Image (cartoon, rainbow, N blue to C red):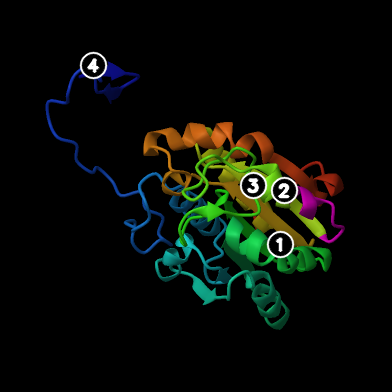
Amino acid sequence: MNEFEGRPVVPTDAPPSAPARMVEDFTPSLVDVGAHHLCPGCGEPIAIRSLMEAVEELDLARRLIAVFGIGCYTAFSNNLDVEVLQALHGRAPSVATGVKRARPDTMVITIQGDGDMVSEGLQEVLHAAARGENITCVMLNNGVFGETGGHMTATTVLGQRTKTSLEGRDPVAHGRPILLADLVARLDGAAYVARCAVNSAGNVARTKKVILRALETQASGAGFSLVEILTMCPTGWFVETPEAPAYLADSLATVHIGGVLKDILATKSTSPSSTVP
């Protein structure tokens, strides 16, 4: 074993001489159980972990109410140490609106997939944004209905495979994808809109940063915030698990372009707060 700046470095040119062992459990405290039953290579657990890390960092757990949509990620609704409400398919923004208006002192988020938010409930999220509801909506976008068989959603990009469309999305037969974050950013009631991904370590770090900013936006009372997170679904895409991060980069990410699309707080201050009151 070599030494690098005082840290042990295990060579990778041969099998390890001793089996690996857990040194420390880094599961966020707001995730009750780190294990899950989602498919290998799924990006949704990474996204939800980033969300819970942000909630913990801002000390919001006692103020937070999460409204879950319907999808593979719904399995996490009983696995988080925060208050959770279950909404009907696509209706999470309306439920979140009711919660926030009844309890304006709470921090309210929705956790939905692209099938739930765009295919099933597009009008819900658009109207919530147009009204400037002071909630934060998080969309886990993999361009596929993963839970119900792997068919296309309204965000599936041209040429992207799913289990039920192996030739990829065809614009004549299937239409063109809806770019939700771009739509929401054009609405006056939207205060913060960003799109990110979890297919690399750098993108995961950026995802947490935009989640923090979205929660800060809600805490300031500025209005509606949306974070769209591109996630891997190798099972639904019908690709090998190790290929999924690159497939995301070559398909979804070339159309659903990452970045901050709108941030009204940034236009009001050159040194935005990094904490939630």
Considering the numbered disc 2 on the image, is that residue within a helix, a strand or a loop? loop
Q: Is residue 160 left or right of residue 190?
A: left
Q: Nearer the viewer, mark 2 or mark 4?
A: 2
Residue ID for mark 3: 210
The 10 Å Cα crowd at callout 4, few under 14, some 14 to 19, many 20 or more, is: few
Of labels 3 and 4, the one closer to you = 4
N-terminal of the two: label 2 or label 4? Answer: 4
Looking at the image, which residue sits at the far bottom? 102
Q: Amino acid at mark 1?
A: Gln
**Rendered image: mark on residue 6:** none
- Residue 142 part of the magenta segment: no
* Residue 239 placement, left or right of 180: left
Which residues are the magenta region? 181-189
Q: Residue at x 67, y 41 (%)?
A: 256
* Mark 2, residue position: 179
Q: Is residue 24 above or below residue 125?
A: above
The residue carrying pointer 1 sits among few (fewer than 14), some (14 to 19) or many (20 or more) residues within 10 Å by Cα, namely: many
